[in-house]
Amino acid sequence: MVCKITSTNCSRRPRAGFILVEMIVGLAIGALVIAAFAVFSVFNARGFAGFATYATLDLANRKATDQMTKDFRMVQSLTNFSSSAISLVDFDGTSLQYSYSPISQTLSRIKSGVTTVLLRDCSRLSFSMGMRDLTNGTFDFFPTTNTFECKAITVNWCCSRKLLGVASDDMPQSETIVTRN
């Protein structure tokens, strides 16, 4: 039997795994990528939620504007007026009232005992009356307190909602409606 002595060189042996420093660097880079993705996701979610809020508020404002324009243009007479409520006699002789509640932040339309909420999350709303000045030939309206002189009704309001716990920007609206009577 012949025996040969062979030696193995330790420097040529292949490495079998990661060392601790490589593992820590890899985990740090992975954590940074995950953190960046999380921040990006939250930013996008907030942007999409804001867009949805503005679209919803805009739709509600348009519906309220359309309804008020239709009602105020066809009114027979104005019976009672304040900065937060207005009472009218509609074209068919029934009573029509618009009322703003600052506590519930809603604008309600009441016709023949049926209440319809036109605006929600309305932080402020005010009605004002205007009359025409026919002496100078312009279409300007001037404030009046006499319900018989009222030829235009101006409504100013502002709606806002909370977005992820933070109040979003206001959406101020203004509308001046000329009555036909």
Image: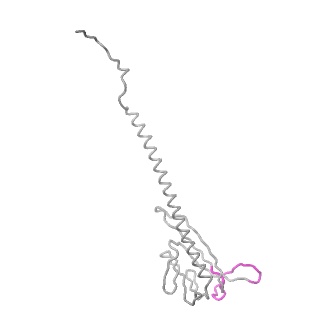
Nearer the observer, 164 or 48: 48
Quarter occupied by the N terminus:
top left
Q: Main secondary structure of the magenta part?
A: loop
Residue at the farthest bottom position: 93
Residue at the farthest front position: 1
| Residue 37 in the image, given as x and y percentages of width and height | 47, 48
| Residue 13 in the image, given as x and y percentages of width and height | 36, 22
Seen in the picture, residue 99 relative to 1 is either above or below; the reply is below
Query: Is 145 contained in the magenta span?
Result: yes
Count of labels in the image: 0
| Residue 176 in the image, given as x and y percentages of width and height | 64, 77
| Residue 149 in the image, given as x and y percentages of width and height | 66, 87
Quarter occupied by the C terminus:
bottom right
Seen in the picture, residue 170 relative to 108 is either above or below; the reply is above
Nearer the observer, 60 or 28: 60
Nearer the observer, 91 or 168: 91
Which corner quadrant of the image does residue 31 belong to? Answer: top left
Residue at the farthest top position: 2
Query: Is 139 contained in the magenta span?
Result: yes
Residue sitting at x 45%, y 47%: 35
Residue at the farthest right position: 136
Q: Is residue 15 left or right of residue 121?
A: left
Which residues make up the magenta segment? 134-153
* Colour theme: one colour
Residue sitting at x 54%, y 71%: 60
